[in-house]
Amino acid sequence: MSVKDDPESRQRITAGCRQRQTGSDNCQVCALHWFAGDFLCRFMLISCVVFIAAVILKPAGASAETIDRLMAAVNGKAITEGELKLARSLNEILMLGTVRAKLSDKDEIQRLIDLELLRQELESFSDLTAAEEEVEGRMEELRKSYAKEGGLTAILERLGLQESELRAYLSLQISILQLIDFRFRPFVSIPEEEIQQYYSTKYAPQIGASGAIVPGLEEVSSKIVRILTEEKVNASLDRWLQDSRRRAQIEYFGGNESEPKGAKK
């Protein structure tokens, strides 16, 4: 059974990650700030969205209390301790070469809640599904990235993960990115004055401070449009998540009640 045809696998995932090629100069910026902290290199293009995925395959003989202890629930969908641990393992694979401060359990739970809200919204858009070719393309990228680290298979084994879990995560992650593009990107517009302001107040000063030759506005105008577009998509997504939290039934268990403003207990 493929990942797309496996509703259990899709149900257990709450997030994912992919790298997006933009044709820019190897630029990287986080599109969803709750997974990568503050934005890096704001003047560059977005090329990486980091989601955390969680798919539970309970090992034989494992304690149900340890694996499935409830941490939170979103509209009746449970987030368990096992999902939290698996999310961290999957994130470790996707963040190769990236230094990031370790988050507390409470912060990780907040990320999983946001992404569960996105997953539930995705259920209303059956056409937004990842093609197998896209999933395999991401798998191949990861295989190449880990070639000098002993191979992707060895990393999965060290973390106690299966390739099917990683594929399931990648499939849903791609679908969520499609949802974000569908819901928010068409409504973004970038006036000419915003392009000029960004160039004069951010782009040119930062490039100049690095000692590089500052290109003219005409040369980088399209790049700046893409930067500003991603920023506005991010802002729209943040507003949507805040509104979704206010409308959602969010419950916490075991002292994990550090929800942002607007969440329901």
Image (cartoon, rainbow, N blue to C red):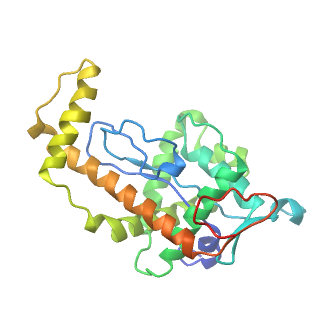
Residue under the point 60% across and 78% down:
7
Q: From the viewer's side, name the closer residue of 33 and 17.
A: 33
Q: From the viewer's side, name the closer residue of 86 and 203.
A: 203
Image coordinates of residue 133 in percent, x first then y, are 41, 64
Q: Is residue 161 left or right of residue 115?
A: right
Residue under the point 59% across and 41% down:
151
Quadrant in the picture for the N terminus: bottom right
Image coordinates of residue 5 in percent, x first then y, are 55, 78
Question: Could one spot residue 87 in this view of the protein?
Answer: no
Q: Is residue 151 left or right of residue 81?
A: left
Image coordinates of residue 123 in percent, x first then y, are 51, 79
In the image, residue 163 sits, relative to residue 24, either above or below, namely: below
Image coordinates of residue 67 in percent, x first then y, are 82, 61
**Which residue sits furthest front?**
261
Q: From the viewer's side, name the closer residue of 123 and 96.
A: 123
Question: Which of the 4 image quarters holds residue 152?
Answer: top right
Question: Could one spot residue 36 in this view of the protein?
Answer: yes
Q: Is residue 223 left or right of residue 235?
A: left
Residue under the point 80% across and 58% down:
255
Question: Which of the 4 image quarters holds residue 63?
Answer: bottom right
